[in-house]
Amino acid sequence: MAADLGELLVPYMPTIRVPKTGDRVFKSECTFSFDSPESEGGLYVCMNTFLGFGREHVERHYRKTGQSVYMHLKRHVKEKATGAAGGAIPRRRNGKVFLDLELNRDFNGEDYEYEDEAKLVIFPDHFEIPLPNIEELPALVTIACDAVLNAPSAYKKQEAESWEEEIQVSRHARSLRQLDNGVRIPPSGWKCQKCEMRENLWLNLTDGTVLCGKWFFDGSGGNGHALEHYRETNHPLAVKLDTITPDGADVYSFEEEEAVLDPNISDHLAHFGIDMLQMLQKRTENGHHTDNNARPRVSEWEVIQESGMKLKAVYGSGYTGVKNLGNSCYLGTVMQVLFSIPDFQRMYVGNLQRIYDYSPLDPSQDFATQMAKLGHGLLSGQFSKPPMKSELIEQHQQKGVSPRMLKALVGRGHPEFSSNRQQDAHEFLLHIINLVERNSAGSENPSDVFRFLVEERVQCCQSRRVRYAERVDYCIQLPTPIEAATNREELLAYEAKRKDAEENMKAPPEPVRARIPFTACLQAFTEPENVPDFWSSALQAKSAGVKTSRFASFPEYLIVQVKKFTFGVDWVPKKLDLAIDVPDFLDLNRLRATGLQAGEEELPDLMPPIVLPEDTRDNSMGSVDSPEIDEVAVMQLAEMGFPLEACRKAVYYTGNMGPEMAFNWIIAHMEEPDFAEPLALPSMMDPGPSTSDSPMGAATPLANSPPEESIAILTSMGFPRTHSIQALKATNNNLERALDWIFTHPEEEESDVLSDMADTEPNDNAFSNANSHSDSTLSPDRETSGPRVKDGPGRYELFAFISHMGASTMSGHYVCHIKKEGRWLIYNDHKVCLSERPPKDLGYIYFYHRLSSS
């Protein structure tokens, strides 16, 4: 028999692999479905790719790859025998088979026992070889089988190899010198101290300077002032301001040229007034976070989860819960709402077979496949079945589906969503919309239903002239004016009692929740706001400016976020305790944009002048200084045999991003006739057209071509020159936004209408951009080649909302309520029940669908 098995496996031996370091073995869940070894058909693990497949999907993998040998894993679960054996330890056969295996079990180990079974299956004849079978199998096959059976689960391995574990402690962390210069960092309102940029800001941990980072292709932007400061001062460590959480922050060592760990980060931040210790939270017994002062939140937890009510569980299609993987409720609530929208159902579940058939060789790394998998799990009803007649309803547990594979994929490389910490559901929603956008190029894009156009009207208070611009957005953020609370007197009385209790060491009074009318929030949303650092092209100087925002189009589905979270002066994130009477029906037609009105005069299309640094102004009237170029990178390229001037141009046009990027530029431009000509920058040598009486440094027309060096950086990445110019013009010459613009606007969708539009004002307003870019695009109603904006009437009905319990987005718990078939339901992790009293006034993110015009 041994010889027979050996001969049988000989043709397949080249395809059987032993898992190596770095290989992930998916032996707990199918990559296309939620089948596991506990499922009726078990799980098939490919002995070449180590991907897992349920019975329904293993044939597809065999046909696509030709891989024939799979390990079939099956766990048999049965209720323990009663009587004397009732208290026995659960019996396991082949206990080593599923060593270190994470399963989606809903069985209590004290009530059930299980037996594990493994065998090799050879396709297409389904020939089975029971395991273990050491005597009869070839040695290589035995080693491979043992390695697969004993390998850690793919997810445990992924956690062990997370980027957080690879970062090393900086050698400067323990001996860092901090200057006693009295610097205190506020919790918001930061900007670079040299160029006034408001993004990608880094706090130097030695002297407290706040400066911008360098522009990278991952979307972070800046002018490199933080690095310049290090070169001038040798102060080695800096922390990125928007990454500070109770669990740590992103720290970079300029001297070590890499991200590092700082074990003393709490003390180093406290030196500048940032108290991380007060931001720490403790976990409750049920695994959710709460804060030390839990008293004000008790009522909120009970009301939102509808505690104390006997909620009726529901089952079937659309009523499947999502298991909480440990602080993953933010993901579960967002995905429940998205897959209640027909466009997402149609895109991912309606096209399920096509997505699966055209999936890549590793479906676990394909966004569309994992979205389709989760969508099918939520909508099929396979994992939401009512109790059998023999079961007691009270003891029946709703299973739900585990989003582990999708979470690993969408969080990969993200500093927050790749962790196991609690996250902001609103930020995750925008992250998912961004991923849907990026993965829908050239195909149906379900996030079109959220996209709408914002008209921004900016007025110079001195000249009274105006500028109109349009951009794309995905949700609105409603302010919460506490001063408009209907119980203001009660709030003032509570605040007085609270202060008195603190001063006299007495017990705090019962907290009072602010009740704010929705109309007051909407009024605050529509009011004009001051524009910081506004530059008036009419005055050619900084001036006071105000901005108002209106809907240039209305989306099919409107997302409304209530701004409940803020930071205290001590950097401790706080949640405002308030209730808003959010309406079931909403009419926003009065907020429709009107465009330029009769009698209004537009601001000239001029850009602010380029402000030269102090140390170069003396030379500004003479010959143009040579641009800053990384000479080390130039010499590395020159040593490869490329002309020196070509190397200088390559390094300059790729933004000093290093020799590898410059090398790619050289390869792309080697055939050009001026390849080896000296570097010449027309944008620096020729200031371009200007008014006859404009002095040196005056504003230049917006119609001018973007800076040649910016165009060169994009073209060096392989993008066509015309498309690059269009992207830069559409994003006010912002490189990182232009790069995002290109990815979301395929070349065939170019439109000349973008060339005269620029979003020149800051984007920190009540409309919240889902992507880091701002699309200046028009509705199809006005331009057939514009973006997909589904404009219509501004009348809406509430159909879902996500609620948060806890004191901070970094702690607490999320649930969602969704209206289906005229009934409100509560989705609380894996449990789905009919809602008795949906707490609409305590929601965090609200979802409205457009009403028909009839």
Image (cartoon, rainbow, N blue to C red):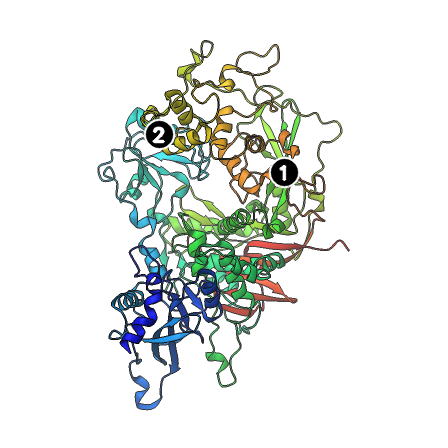
- Give the crowd class for mark 2: few <14, some 14-19, many >=20 residues within 10 Å: many
**Residue situated furthest right in the rendering:** 854
Residue 15: image location, x then y, percent: 35, 61
| Residue type, label 1 | Thr
Q: Say whether residue 13 is left or right of residue 346.
A: left
Instruction: Provide the residue designation for mark 2.
Output: 227
Identify the residue shown where x is 56% and y is 27%. 534
Q: Say whether residue 343 is left or right of residue 257.
A: right
- Which corner quadrant of the image does residue 254 belong to? top left
Regarding residue 580, the answer to whether it shows in the image is no
Residue 73: image location, x then y, percent: 37, 72
Instruction: Provide the residue designation for mark 1.
Output: 777
Q: For numbered disc 1, what is the local secondary structure?
A: loop
In terms of depth relative to the viewer, which is nearer, 560 or 253?
Answer: 253
Q: Is residue 806 above or below residue 81?
A: above
- Which corner quadrant of the image does residue 508 belong to? bottom left
Identify the residue shown where x is 31% and y is 88%. 85
Q: Say whether residue 43 is left or right of residue 480.
A: left
Mark in the foreground, 2 or 1? 1
Q: Is residue 508 above or below residue 656?
A: below
- Give the crowd class for mark 1: few <14, some 14-19, many >=20 residues within 10 Å: many
| Residue type, label 2 | Leu
Identify the residue shown where x is 50% and y is 62%. 373
Asked if marks 2 and 1 touch (Cβ < 8 Å), the reply is no
Q: In this view, does 343 lie above or below 187?
A: below
Q: Is residue 742 above or below residue 612?
A: below
Quadrant location of the C terminus?
Answer: bottom right
- Which corner quadrant of the image does residue 71 belong to? bottom left
**How many numbered marks have been drawn onto this rendered protein structure?**
2
Quadrant location of the N terminus?
Answer: bottom left
Q: Say whether residue 717 is left or right of residue 727.
A: left
Question: Which label's residue is closer to the chain start, 2 or 1?
Answer: 2
